[in-house]
Amino acid sequence: MFITQCYGQVLSIPQIWPVFKREVTNNMYTTSASYWARVACGICTFFFYPFILTVCSIWLFGLQVLTVQSFCEWWGILTLQAFVGSSFGMAMGCLIPDSGAATIVAQLFVIMFNMGAGFYQNTS
């Protein structure tokens, strides 16, 4: 979830950079207006994509006890991950103007975060 949202934002920011720079230079809108417009447009994926993943993951995991509260908690966790991934990707896309370099740096951070979360561990 985090990775999907992160890479979507990393690749989209450098692609729209020339248009963004031209429109801000012509005083068509401000930087904050552009940011909030991008967040508002992406808000649909913050709720629908995690909802679809929640339905699929509950079916795949075969949870024995499923209540409305547990469903909403799982959905909420995935929604928060989508927000964090999108914000991180937008930050990487804004800080590094080359989409290839931004993707590599984002992958580096994702690997570092996964190592810190215990996904990669020595089993011996």
Image (cartoon, rainbow, N blue to C red):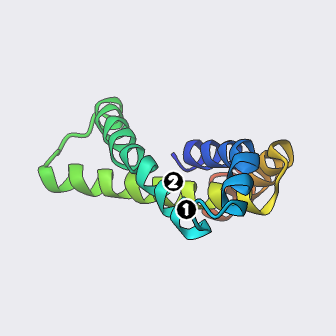
Q: Nearer the viewer, residue 118 or 33?
A: 33
Number of labels in the image equals 2
Identity of the residue drawn at 66% across and 43% down: 12
Identity of the residue drawn at 72% across and 62% down: 25
The image shows residue 6 at horizontal and vertical percentages of 61, 50
Identity of the residue drawn at 45% across and 48% down: 42
Tell me the residue that label 1 is attached to.
35
Amino acid found under the numbered disc labelled 2:
Arg
**Up-down: is 43 above or below 24?**
above
Q: Nearer the viewer, residue 116 or 6?
A: 6
Q: Is residue 44 left or right of residue 72?
A: right
Q: Nearer the viewer, residue 67 or 53?
A: 53
Q: Place residue 61 in its image quadrant.
A: top left
The image shows residue 65 at horizontal and vertical percentages of 17, 45
Q: Residues within 10 Å of mark 1 (few under 14, many from 20)?
A: few
Tell me the residue that label 2 is attached to.
38
Residue 72: tell me if it is visible.
yes
